[in-house]
Amino acid sequence: MLKISIIEGHHLVQQRQTKNGVRYYQEAYAHLGGAFPQQIEIPIKSPTEGKPIGDYDLDISTFQVGRFKNLELNPFELKLIPAAKNVAKAS
């Protein structure tokens, strides 16, 4: 699954004024396999929905099938779930 990180200093909910009203978002970083993670914006509906600092995976409901039967992300609702911690099993 795609790893998304919300880090200290970039975890506060921000807002942007648009012609349709206020848009809320939170900055995060997507780990796409390169040397450095890419900065992204996670859209949120209200300031109270901001996620705490940590690592997350994209929920399967974030994906949708587009008009031409291609797989795509819903750009208006990126649902994040806490990343599962790697648990070392004792032998």
Image: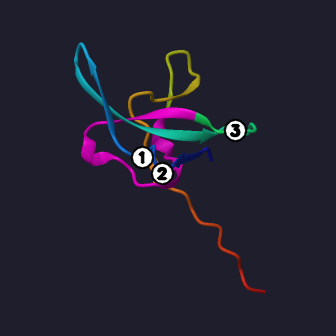
Start and end of the magenta stretch?
Answer: 39-63
Q: Quadrant of residue 45?
A: top left
CB contact under 8 Å: marks 3 and 2 = no
Q: CA distance from mark 3 to mark 2?
A: 17 Å
- Location of residue 46 with respect to 91 vertically, above or below: above
> Horizontal and vertical percent for residue 39?
55, 34
Residue in front for this viewpoint, 70 or 9: 9
**Distance (Cα) linking label 1 and label 3:** 18 Å
Q: Residue furthest left?
A: 21
Q: Farthest residue toward the front?
A: 9
**For the residue carrying disc 2, how many other residues have a C-alpha within 10 Å: few (<14), some (14-19), or many (20+)?**
few
Q: CA distance from mark 1 to mark 2?
A: 6 Å
Name the side, left or right, on which 27 lies relative to 48: right
Q: Which residue is mark 3?
A: 36
Report the amino acid beneath label 1.
Answer: His
- Image location of residue 78, percent across then percent down: 44, 38
> In front here: 33 or 66?
33
Amino acid marked by disc 2: Glu
Q: Are marks 1 and 2 in contact (CB under 8 Å)?
A: yes
Which of pointers 3 and 2 indicates the residue nearer the eye? 2
Q: Secondary structure at mark 3?
A: loop
Which residue carries the number 1 mark?
Answer: 11
Residue occupying the point 62% across, 47% down: 1
Residue 49: image x %, image y %?
A: 30, 47
Residue 8, which numbered label?
2
Mark 3 nearby-residue class (10 Å; few <14, some 14–19, many ≥20): few
Residue type indicated by callout 3: Phe
| Residue at image point 33% right, 35% down | 14
The quarter of the image holding the C terminus is: bottom right
Colour convention: rainbow
**Label 1 SS:** loop
